[in-house]
Image (spheres, grey):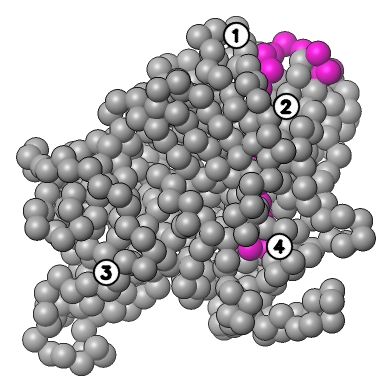
């Protein structure tokens, strides 16, 4: 990943984020040949990600070997250029390119314009304009969204039904950034041309060859990410809103673990299944995620977003064991010793008011939970983490996740738990963005979760309800710059406010609920 360093002088002018209609194609330089086919094109959309107080990652993909050119400004007219740099888009990375921008002004709207120049001819290609906002240096208000689960269960892009409508709705919320909690793709779910709906109508997908079967080859995994870029709402959202990306299981295959996942292609020399290696490579090719030094190739990282917020992106796939059955002869793991130690250390070192743990799985459901009772196997790592947080006096921790294909607010209460050595905390679940919807699951009492709100499919609606029936969800978090109060709101694809809660930051002890709003 190339690195861009900006000059120290810049304009600190404040302004509103542009409306969605202003996401226009703009040219950085007029080509000497006018025909579009003779100059490099941007294949799909443009993206930014991992934005902090003075840095961000810019991503795009070309249609041929090319050099990505980026210019940045604090004004949309680009009257003043605060930085410029370039990086190659080559076949080895499927013509994708990423730039790490550094030394940017904090708390600013940054506009960037991007183009590709043909490596062989030097001919300048089409240009596009994108936007992100850097993290504040002072205690300014913050607003962000989270969700997960895109293009699952065969529900792809039906243009007649509005395509990926959740992305259009999320753009209308004008967030500072977006956490994608995993399942960016469903590599194990082909997208057919048609699917029958429960009301007798027909869902008609946009189809591609690479999404016509379960992914096994590197090209097929990459094709899953390219498919999402065919949707206009997806492209418009990512050009305007930076993403903090993590993964879950469907970036590889259903419920994968690094030990038990394989196919007929076998394993690499280090024991990694080739299926996982290909999926991991495609993920890092297509995500606007920064290299992480010695931890390069790992999803877990901390993103500092000003004095009010640190976001801890954790990985509950890369380190997990193969089985989670009770009675097995070892304690089990889902975070792994290295990541668990890192998370404890970074949480203790954080001076931000709020510590958001962005998880790809909920604690009281699915692959972590093992049924009612004291901690068993994978739950031991969660118990260890929660008790260490209590002993260290770390406060104001909130967990965010997706995965379950419904939306919920869980309050973990030690007084209702089998394991009680922790302080109470909130966990919020929201999704899917564009996939089949399910009904709420049964919570495990190990850590005492109470469902304060939940919405998904009813028994009458059945499971795997199509996106057109409206049970698609995302969450919004607002942190007030003066009071520090965090407001979490659960919303649906039509931007309806379903439920919310205000949480007051505490200097010590447990966070207190100010009010819940149905």
Looking at marks 4 and 1 on the same chain, the residue that comes earlier in the sequence is marked by 4
Looking at marks 4 and 2 on the same chain, the residue that comes earlier in the sequence is marked by 2
Label 1 packing within 10 angstroms: few (<14), some (14-19), many (20+)? some
Q: Which residue is mark 1?
A: 509
Q: CA distance from mark 3 to mark 1?
A: 48 Å
Residue range of the region highlighted in magenta in the rendering: 415-435
Disc number placed over residue 470 in the picture, else none: 4
Label 4 packing within 10 angstroms: few (<14), some (14-19), many (20+)? some
Which quarter shows the C terminus?
top right
Task: Confirm or deny contact between disc 3 and disc 4 (CB under 8 A).
Answer: no
Horizontally, is 470 left or right of 150 in the view?
right
Label 1 element class:
loop
Q: CA distance from mark 4 to mark 2?
A: 26 Å
The reply to whether residue 251 is visible in this rendering is no
Disc number placed over residue 411 in the picture, else none: 2
State whether residue 9 is above or below residue 180: above
Task: Confirm or deny contact between disc 3 and disc 1 (CB under 8 A).
Answer: no
State whether residue 171 is above or below residue 194: above
Q: Which residue is mark 3?
A: 128
Question: Residue 202 occupies which quadrant of the picture?
Answer: bottom right
Q: Residue 487 colored magenta?
A: no
């Amino acid at each position: 990943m190339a690195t861009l360093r900006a000059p120290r002088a810049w304009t600190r002018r404040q302004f509103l984020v542009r409306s969605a209609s202003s996401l226009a194609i703009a040219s950085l330089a007029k080509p000497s040949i006018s025909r579009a086919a003779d100059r490099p094109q941007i294949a799909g959309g443009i993206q930014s990600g991992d934005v902090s107080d003075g840095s961000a990652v810019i991503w795009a993909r070309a249609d041929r070997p090319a050099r990505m050119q980026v210019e940045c400004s604090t004004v949309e007219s680009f009257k003043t250029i605060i930085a410029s740099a370039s990086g190659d888009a080559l076949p080895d990375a499927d013509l994708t390119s990423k730039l790490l921008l550094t030394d940017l002004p904090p708390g600013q709207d940054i506009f960037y314009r991007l183009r590709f120049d043909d490596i062989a001819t030097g001919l300048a290609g089409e240009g596009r304009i994108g936007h992100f906002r850097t993290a504040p240096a002072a205690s300014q208000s913050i607003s962000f969204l989270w969700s997960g689960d895109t293009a699952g269960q065969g529900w792809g892009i039906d243009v007649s039904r509005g395509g990926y409508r959740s992305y259009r709705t999320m753009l209308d919320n004008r967030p500072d950034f977006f956490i994608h909690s995993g399942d960016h793709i469903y590599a194990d779910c082909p997208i057919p041309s048609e699917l029958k709906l429960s009301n007798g109508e027909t869902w008609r997908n946009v189809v591609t060859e690479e999404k016509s079967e379960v992914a096994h080859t590197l090209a097929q995994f990459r094709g899953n990410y390219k498919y999402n870029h065919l949707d206009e709402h997806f492209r418009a959202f990512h050009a305007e809103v930076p993403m903090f990306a993590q993964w879950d299981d469907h970036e590889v295959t259903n419920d994968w673990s690094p030990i038990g996942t394989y196919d007929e292609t076998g394993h690499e020399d280090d024991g990694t299944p080739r299926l996982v290696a290909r999926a991991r490579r495609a993920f890092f090719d297509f995500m606007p995620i920064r290299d992480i030094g010695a931890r390069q190739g790992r999803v877990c990282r901390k993103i500092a977003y000003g004095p009010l917020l640190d976001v801890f992106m954790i990985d509950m796939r890369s380190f997990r064991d193969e089985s989670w059955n009770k009675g097995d002869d070892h304690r089990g793991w889902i975070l792994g010793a290295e990541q668990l130690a890192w998370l404890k250390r970074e949480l203790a070192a954080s001076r931000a008011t709020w510590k958001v743990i962005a998880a790809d799985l909920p604690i009281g459901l699915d692959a972590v939970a093992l049924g009612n009772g004291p901690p068993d196997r994978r739950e031991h790592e969660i118990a260890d983490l929660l008790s260490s947080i209590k002993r260290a006096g770390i406060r104001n921790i909130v967990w965010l996740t997706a995965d379950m294909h419904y939306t919920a607010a869980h309050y973990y209460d030690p007084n209702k738990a089998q394991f009680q050595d922790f302080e109470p905390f909130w966990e919020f679940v929201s999704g899917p963005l564009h996939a089949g919807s399910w009904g709420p699951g049964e919570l495990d009492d190990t850590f005492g979760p109470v469902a304060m709100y939940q919405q998904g499919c009813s028994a009458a609606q059945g499971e795997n309800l199509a996106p057109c029936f409206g049970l698609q969800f995302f969450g919004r978090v607002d942190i007030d710059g003066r009071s520090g109060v965090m407001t979490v709101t659960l919303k649906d694809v039509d931007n309806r406010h379903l439920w919310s809660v205000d949480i007051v930051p505490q200097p010590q002890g447990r966070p207190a609920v100010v009010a819940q709003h149905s």
